[in-house]
Amino acid sequence: MSLRTLVCPYEPELINGFHEREIAVRVDSPSLVREAGNAVRNSGNRLLCVILDSAQPVDAVPFEDGWSGIPILLTAPAAGEFRSIVHKLPLLRSLNLKIYLSSTNENIRDARILSSLGLSCALRIEPGAVDWEALSDLMTYALCGRAPHAPIDPFDYISRNYDSKVHLKWGAVYLDDPEKYFHLDKEKNVALSCKEAVAGQFIGCLDDIERAEPEEIARRTDAWSRNFTGFSPCATCEGFKLCMGSLRPEDEITEGCTAFFSETLETLEALYAQEQRAGKDHVWRL
């Protein structure tokens, strides 16, 4: 079994118990960002990133020059006031920073502004009330916008990893991929996603799981295939190869997500065709 990247809380004793592992370390205070990052690097492990879970909007986070060189994944409830963010732009652009927001209408709008300011960001798209048209507009901007802008995930990840011949899993954008990431608590109990770790839904202890991988991981990895047993609106969706049923709404009303992922596929195919034509002469020459 390949060793997963570990997503764990900042607990020095826990981190020092690992060796030559890739670790994403989670903190809830800006004052711990530098300390946590250095702790992982000094422990003989590899730092993927420091995850800063902020209860404050982006504009209120006290960013520091000392964070330079530390990959930071900032989760925040909102962007906040852009006039405050603009004042901090030189510092923010100097950091190795990605900003994660939920996919509310306000955050969909603000992700575009953050990107236009040169700040990399990501929207967490989850089943529920999503403004799919607004998300489609953002997707088009992210993939086709000609004006310089920073990457917006999951669209950037999807476009970089898209292959028309295979289905695409993009949970890795959120470090939620059981084939690549384990989420731990301080006792080394394993959850298969961030949400499950927060809810205390663990499948066992890391040492036991890495000795003999439980069937639950295989079931989770192949969960997409259950859309083809019984009736599922996802089974006939044109955009299934991108969503794979992961955003199937509880009310089974799939018009919005179907239109969104179908449009995303069309956009990706058009971009691929453009790349294939790139460099070829379209006008005759002597």
Image (cartoon, grey):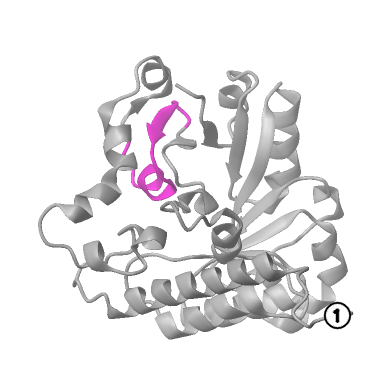
Q: Position of residue 50 (x, y in %)?
A: 65, 45
How many discs mark residues in the rendered view? 1
Taking depth in this image into account, of 167 and 253 the one nearest to the observer is 167
Using the rendered view, name the quadrant where residue 114 is placed: bottom right
Q: Is residue 149 left or right of residue 135?
A: right
Q: In which quarter of the image is residue 159?
A: bottom right
Q: Is mark 1 on a helix, strand or loop?
A: loop
Q: What stretch is highlighted in magenta?
A: 186-202
Q: Measured along the vertical axis of the image, is residue 27 above or below residue 79?
A: above
Q: In this view, does 121 lie above or below 134?
A: above
Q: Is residue 26 left or right of residue 148?
A: left
- Quadrant of the drawing holding the N terminus: top left
Q: Which residue is drawn at 59% across and 23% down?
A: 13
Residue located farthest toward the front when viewing the structure as drawn? 286
Write the residue at 41% across / 38% down: 178
**Neighbour class for label 1 at 10 Å: few (<14), some, many (≥20)?**
few
Which of 56/211 is in front? 211
217 magenta-colored: no
Judge from the rendering whether residue 27 lies leftward or rightward of residue 117; answer left or right: left
Task: Say whether residue 189 is magenta.
Answer: yes
Where does the image place residue 273, in percent across and percent down from the top left? 60, 70
Q: Name the residue under label 1.
A: 285
Q: Where is residue 65 in the image (x, y as percent from the top left)?
A: 86, 54
In the rendered image, the vertical position of residue 85 relative to residue 83, given as above or below: above
Amino acid of disc 1: Arg
Q: From the viewer's perspective, is 93 left or right of 119?
A: right
Q: Is residue 80 visible?
A: no
Residue 257 in view (yes/no): yes
Outermost residue, top direction?
A: 211
Which quarter of the rendering shows the C terminus?
bottom right
